Image (cartoon, helix red, strand yellow):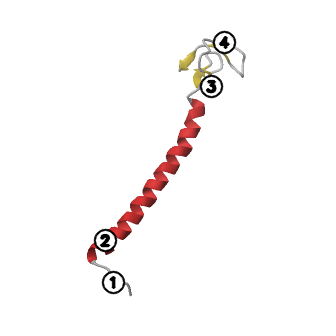
Amino acid sequence: MIPMSLFQLFTLPLFIVLTALFSLACAYDLVIGRRQGTYRKKAICRCHNCRYIYAAPRRTPLARCPRCEKLNTPVRQ
């Protein structure tokens, strides 16, 4: 049996759990950051005619609805 103090018995599992949580948080941030990066380049549009919600390039003043072909302004940039 390996001799360990009470302090080591407490800190070693705590360190392992905190390291695992930090690693999971970093991995989650990388995945979500990549996914959100594609949406940041798009503007959200809502068609006034058919109420369809779609994404259009960000710097487009009027975006054409893919469903009914009507021109719409972006709701949110």
Q: Which mark is residue 55?
A: 3
Please report the residue visible at 27 percent of the width from the left and 73 percent of the height from the top: 7
Sequence-wise, the earlier of marks 1 and 3 is: 1
Nearer the viewer's eye, disc 2 or disc 3? 2
Question: Badge 1 local density, few (<14 within 10 Å), some, or many (20+)?
Answer: few
Q: Helix or strand or loop: what does disc 4 sit on?
A: strand
Nearer the viewer's eye, disc 4 or disc 2? 2
Q: Helix or strand or loop: what does disc 1 sit on?
A: loop
> Alpha carbon of mark 4 to alpha carbon of mark 2: how far?
64 Å
The N terminus: image quadrant: bottom left
In the image shown, does 54 or 60 lie closer to the viewer?
A: 60
Q: Quadrant of residue 56?
A: top right
Sequence-wise, the earlier of marks 2 and 3 is: 2
Q: Picture coordinates of residue 40 (x, y %)?
A: 55, 28
Which residue is label 4 attached to? Answer: 71
Q: Helix or strand or loop: what does disc 3 sit on?
A: strand
Q: Picture coordinates of residue 11 (x, y %)?
A: 32, 68
> Alpha carbon of mark 4 to alpha carbon of mark 3: how far?
13 Å
Residue 53 visible in the snapshot: no
Question: Badge 4 local density, few (<14 within 10 Å), some, or many (20+)?
Answer: some
Asked if the residues shown at circle 4 and circle 2 are in contact, with their CB atoms under 8 angstroms apart, the answer is: no
Please report the residue visible at 37 percent of the width from the left and 64 percent of the height from the top: 15
In the image shown, does 70 or 55 lie closer to the viewer?
A: 55
Q: Which mark is residue 3?
A: 1
Nearer the viewer's eye, disc 1 or disc 2? 1
Q: Helix or strand or loop: what does disc 2 sit on?
A: helix
Residue 37 visible in the snapshot: yes
Sequence-wise, the earlier of marks 4 and 1 is: 1
Name above or below for residue 68 compared with residue 38.
above
Sequence-wise, the earlier of marks 4 and 2 is: 2
Q: Picture coordinates of residue 24 (x, y %)?
A: 49, 54
Nearer the viewer's eye, disc 4 or disc 3? 3
